Amino acid sequence: MPASQARPSPVAALAADYTRLRATTMALAEPLSAEDAQVQSMPDASPTKWHLAHITWFFETFVLERYEAGFAPFDPGFRVLYNSYYQGVGERYPRAQRGLVTRPTLDDVKRYRRHVDARMQACIAAHAGDADFDALVTLGLQHEQQHQELLLTDIKHAFGCNPGRAAYAQRWPVARVGPAPVKWFGFDAALVEHGHDPALDGAFCFDNETPRHKVFVAAFELASRPASNAEYQAFIAAGGYERPELWLSQGWDWVCQGRRTAPLYWAADAPGEWRHHTLQGLVAIDPHTPVCHLSYFEADAFARWSGARLPTEQEWERAARALKAPADALRRANFADRGAYHPLPAAAAADEAPVQLYGDVWEWTQSSYQAYPGFKPWPGAVGEYNGKFMVNQYVLRGGSCATPAGHVRASYRNFFPTDAQWQFSGVRLARNPEPPDAP
Amino acid sequence: MPASQARPSPVAALAADYTRLRATTMALAEPLSAEDAQVQSMPDASPTKWHLAHITWFFETFVLERYEAGFAPFDPGFRVLYNSYYQGVGERYPRAQRGLVTRPTLDDVKRYRRHVDARMQACIAAHAGDADFDALVTLGLQHEQQHQELLLTDIKHAFGCNPGRAAYAQRWPVARVGPAPVKWFGFDAALVEHGHDPALDGAFCFDNETPRHKVFVAAFELASRPASNAEYQAFIAAGGYERPELWLSQGWDWVCQGRRTAPLYWAADAPGEWRHHTLQGLVAIDPHTPVCHLSYFEADAFARWSGARLPTEQEWERAARALKAPADALRRANFADRGAYHPLPAAAAADEAPVQLYGDVWEWTQSSYQAYPGFKPWPGAVGEYNGKFMVNQYVLRGGSCATPAGHVRASYRNFFPTDAQWQFSGVRLARNPEPPDAP
Amino acid sequence: MPASQARPSPVAALAADYTRLRATTMALAEPLSAEDAQVQSMPDASPTKWHLAHITWFFETFVLERYEAGFAPFDPGFRVLYNSYYQGVGERYPRAQRGLVTRPTLDDVKRYRRHVDARMQACIAAHAGDADFDALVTLGLQHEQQHQELLLTDIKHAFGCNPGRAAYAQRWPVARVGPAPVKWFGFDAALVEHGHDPALDGAFCFDNETPRHKVFVAAFELASRPASNAEYQAFIAAGGYERPELWLSQGWDWVCQGRRTAPLYWAADAPGEWRHHTLQGLVAIDPHTPVCHLSYFEADAFARWSGARLPTEQEWERAARALKAPADALRRANFADRGAYHPLPAAAAADEAPVQLYGDVWEWTQSSYQAYPGFKPWPGAVGEYNGKFMVNQYVLRGGSCATPAGHVRASYRNFFPTDAQWQFSGVRLARNPEPPDAP
Amino acid sequence: MPASQARPSPVAALAADYTRLRATTMALAEPLSAEDAQVQSMPDASPTKWHLAHITWFFETFVLERYEAGFAPFDPGFRVLYNSYYQGVGERYPRAQRGLVTRPTLDDVKRYRRHVDARMQACIAAHAGDADFDALVTLGLQHEQQHQELLLTDIKHAFGCNPGRAAYAQRWPVARVGPAPVKWFGFDAALVEHGHDPALDGAFCFDNETPRHKVFVAAFELASRPASNAEYQAFIAAGGYERPELWLSQGWDWVCQGRRTAPLYWAADAPGEWRHHTLQGLVAIDPHTPVCHLSYFEADAFARWSGARLPTEQEWERAARALKAPADALRRANFADRGAYHPLPAAAAADEAPVQLYGDVWEWTQSSYQAYPGFKPWPGAVGEYNGKFMVNQYVLRGGSCATPAGHVRASYRNFFPTDAQWQFSGVRLARNPEPPDAP
């Protein structure tokens, strides 16, 4: 049988990807009522309905408008309404008011999706194989995956504002495993290549992962797994939120102004008896599960208390590159396709290498989000994708339980401001080779 | 036929009132989708869904809990969720977050209403005729009418935040009548009785309309009708929003901080070419219609520019008492039952007395909202109905096109802060008997 | 000796008044360093230096500019810098930044005062006796007295922000008198004349005290003296700041947002052991002294807790008119000329009439600050003196220990927003003739 | 003459340094009145009086308390009042209210300085030569120099709020030199040592300059001099403040919210006719002078518009290390000892290397302020000096016209948030070796 038969045609492959990923989005929205899909619980979050429409707008604006003969928009008003931040595409509706747009309705938006999907399939049939076209469609699908994750984190936040703390999903099965103590893996100083490598990471990447460049990484040690709820509870019990010397100066202000005493979504029924709001509703906190919904400030303070520090993104990537079977690590990770929608305790022991680098929780690094040497944004309006955010944000690595499988890689850079908590963000400790001070 | 047959029994009358008024509420919500009913466009406004539930909560809490044997709440969580401001009834959900509560859904709330309605009908059958019971149910129905009006003003505001400015209703028929020039009606100084009189106003009133008391009202003159859009446009054209000497000091701050140049909902496509958002969508401004959505500050500045002033509430009530056929005035008024949901030009000439005292627009008075001499709030939790708001608000009189027919009377006092605009609030001028300065 | 010899000429009288009042201002500023005179501790307060300059600006702008031949301003920049709110006189420097203007220095401002004083004396010599001129100078002097009071209240607030709570004056002598229990004086219902009467109040008044007009005042009872610190401490001890049912709705929000537990300047070293910041530094609270630095909200809540209410300004004025020896009451009052700069316990028993109506503390009334029927602001720029503030403020009566002697009268209306506390504001209770509910 | 005679004793050297630097501070405060020294024009700035006291507090708290026998504080209240941010030293007075503390007066603070100076001289006589002691005193003197610079930048801001824009100093002499066009100097990729080297930089450094470590710096090109006012005016004229595509997303928000159209202190009398507030008052803008008072956002946008970018701090330091006569560069720089207190046009041509790396303006780098690999804060309370600020700030290099001579070095790292403008902060462009896109 000739190879050409075994491998789907470019058209069929792209069409299949498109169909599958677009269907995944709708499946994620399935448990939500029209009202659930309407609300915006804070300016950083968006309504489900907006996500559903915005990612469709992306295909309509950046693909159809360019490749479709006789292009006409589904609705000219949608250009303003569902533009997120692209200044190059004209006016935008104020971000903080997305939750007020009751019309178009959810049904209207679903109609919009079906309409654009049909046109996209025709367009794919006509243009797949053209490198520029394929790149744009692929970008649109990667973009859709990013919004799949945001759909989950944003509805979690919205449900967290409901008095009854509504549940999005069924309870996940947590294996009652004992706690694996943290081990430390050492890495020697080295001059390494850093950033996206198609041979290792696959063809696609975002512009912010490039160009691949040399970086000198000093010797360091990395924890075998993310910090657990039990470890974070020990930090709280040790007065973690009451000791300014553990915090960055801005972090301490953030603690005081918000009168914070625990991560987002945690509530204590009695002193020390923590429960937390999850996508499965309000549940008791499992000690063995990676702690999540930490701000950068919390991750940093916890690390300082632990006599350790946050890793740099170069250290993190170096550790990920050192895995012997990176594909296995990705395949076994707790991504959104598992349907847990919550971090889980490590399934495997960290005998030879760190575990849970991928999935479960995004891991804060101490690296500010900046351009790599020689970085160039993509040309055109899609060039607003990443570069314009390169200030006052910090890099997270590895993906979370809300990240679509297949979306992240060793070079993938996520980024959020230091006070953001509503992502599934956790912490893996690093330290210098010398023994750290005792906590 | 004996009289007893012609007049319905107390039970039948109360049950019929209950049924009719509760059905009116649902009819008002009928044009709205689940999403429309979800949103809260500003802290002062509430979602339709919240209104529907809150007025049901009122009956459940203040009537059923007291009169129903073996009372159990439909859902204990609703006690917190749908309490508006009654401190005596325990915890409250934060007002500004009402738009985030997606669960219960609109369908849940409708179920709640049907459930309480059935229990209320049983309760009415058992207790109607008991004076306290009747008073509470009547209060609940008056309360429901107040929220019918708010439902309309709040959804108008929400739709005003939609880019397409969604329409709630069909376009109203505006008779193309010519403008009737303002006439002035004079009133002599007099020591009068002020406040609710059952013989004149019907049995029911709110506590804030009592006790009836003596007040000395100096001579004054009152305009024959509310100011029109044309007259207000002349104020704008004369630089009304640019001349601090026309405004109260706080009012001028309000103009500057909000960069205001016109009433709420007005938008100019070109200089002077005003359109405004109505419950029928975005339409051209009719010059003969009473101007509405004015803040106190705007009403006051317009009056000053006109060489006049706002009436006091005592003057307004005195004029209303002087009408020869007050029942006719009420019956002919443009209240919500007309279905116009917008002020209309005066249908009749003001030959012998002011017209449009009732309906169309609430009329700002210069009277701050204060207790009448000897005022006592109702006992118990319903005593929080009115008295606790008696500071930094100003009285409006007469009802509007969004007020249910039968709800207002000569002694009825509405009240809002001086910057509130989202009610159908307009202005009728008053002046001292001496000729005013020319504008 | 003929009477004409005993009475000073109009020129001499006005010149003497001018000299005396201007010197009083400088004497009040005497204890303050250049730094003390520089600071502005909140937007509502002004630096001493600004007060000294602004009241001089008033004479320069409203008197010299009109009456002085060949007028030229001392410094054109001062027109902007020392204009308070007169829109008619052009641009203003932002109020909240008055504390940043280090140049002109205090010495510059003293020079400015001397300069204007010399020109004013020449102007008085030339024009005194001209009714318009005399009226303007008199207004300027009354205005200066108002700022003398503000100078004291503002520096008290500034010193209250100093960690050591600096003292302005020597400790006052408090007679250790026992508490006089409150008595109630009854007043019958009556149709009375209200407002300024030159025969009773002297020739001068502000426009807001006119026109004198008829008002019907229902029967009421008034407390013999202002509430004392001991009585207010009982309110606190009874959970006054923790019981929402005692507060106006806005008042309760004010309590919660400011986390308030006591009047301004009070601090508890231990539970119940209150001290307060005074113009004499931080001292223990004397139980018999009138409580002061209450907001309207606190005065109202205390009254409600006491089973009473605030008086209206008509009631207050009626009681003041009923005094048999009003001149004595004014003469004996604790005004600023006493140098106590703090309220004092009543010196005399209230045998036949209320005491302390004048001086000690401004008494909050429940009357919103509004125009009297037929009110007309003064013509020209001085017409901005009062009328433009007639909204969302409440009337206080009687003057305080910081008010210059000779400044207030029975018809005098002071006014502040409901959250203002930094004036010497207290509370005298009123009630309806029926026995009030027990506290 | 033996070498030992030529070199002063450790005691004499330290005592002389102490005397000289402390006197410099007082000389800088000399032109200021007590009122000038009182004001705080924004929370980021501090009053001169506070600076004078705080740096004295530093010696009293960190040196005298440890080394002085029978130590007693000058005034216990000063421990709270003049603590800046050291959590380890107890309570702090709120930063934003420093301008309200009128007592202690400026004279009190001068007395405090003299008092501590006398005790310090005794302490130096007793302990100089002890390594720990010398290190602490040296740190205190470096700290004093940092506040000398802040004294200048803060009083500049305060004077900028004065309507007359008061002048601190006499006009500087600007040589009317023609503009030197920017040249680009290329640097090859290299693995270099980065951070403080005592052999190159002198013995003292702050903890944040350590440890010296390896870093790989890719090839880059650096501009011969900072950008000039003329170049920045061209950016403005090209619509720099109106084109979102030139700005970071946060930067564009900052432009819009602040309605910014030019750097801090610039004012246009007519379109394009700029003047700016300087320490010498309001003067016309010299086109050849380095532009200053740029925020990071402005520096970044200007760089993008120029087809270039900001350098990293590693690139900057590499260029500084490459100077052939670094000592000369430091000696010729326009630091505060010159008394210009304003950047000046380059005195020398940049024939062989970049000029003005030191002095004139701090140069923004694109490097976020982070710990160097292996960084350890100093032990004890002084360890709060630097590390706790290592987030959301960006590094500036080279010192400015307000920096004391002798204070900076090649490894010196200054840092400010991205919106800070009140420092003398400018921009030197960098670019990748490939030719940049045309502007």
Image (tube, coloured by chain):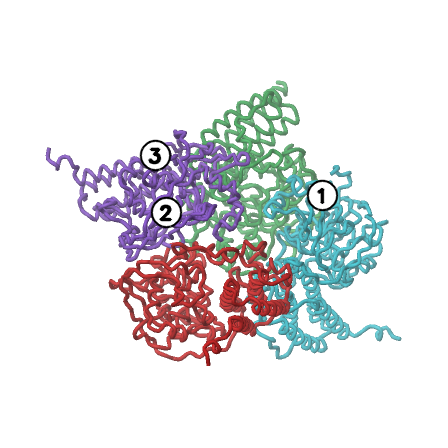
Chain colours: A green, B purple, C red, D cyan
Q: Position of residue B75 (x, y in %)?
A: 31, 44
Q: Which mark is residue D235?
A: 1
Q: Which mark is residue B348?
A: 3
Q: CA distance from mark 3 to mark 1?
A: 64 Å
> What amino acid is at disc 1?
Phe
Q: Residue at x 33, y 58 (%)?
A: C215
In x, y percent, where is residue B316?
Answer: 34, 47
Q: Is residue A367 left or right of residue B215?
A: right
Question: Is C439 in front, or is C46?
Answer: C46
Q: SS for tag 3?
A: loop
**Chain letter for the residue marked with disc 1 in the picture:** D
Crowding at mark 1 (Cα within 10 Å: few <14, some 14-19, many 20+) = some
Q: Which mark sits nearer the N-terminus, 2 or 3?
A: 2
Task: Estimate how packed mark 2 is, as few (under 14), some (14 to 19) or many (20 or more) residues with alpha carbons within 10 Å.
Answer: many
Q: Which type of secondary structure does the marked residue at label 1 adopt?
A: helix
* Residue situated furthest right in the rendering: D1
Of discs 1 and 2, which sits in the foreground? 2
Residue B221: numbered disc: 2
Quadrant position of residue A375: top right
Disc 2 is placed on an element classified as strand
Could you tell me the amino acid type at mark 3? Ala
Residue at the front extreme of this rendering: C2
Residue D438: where, in percent of width, then height? 75, 37
Between D203 and B425, the one nearer to me in the picture = B425
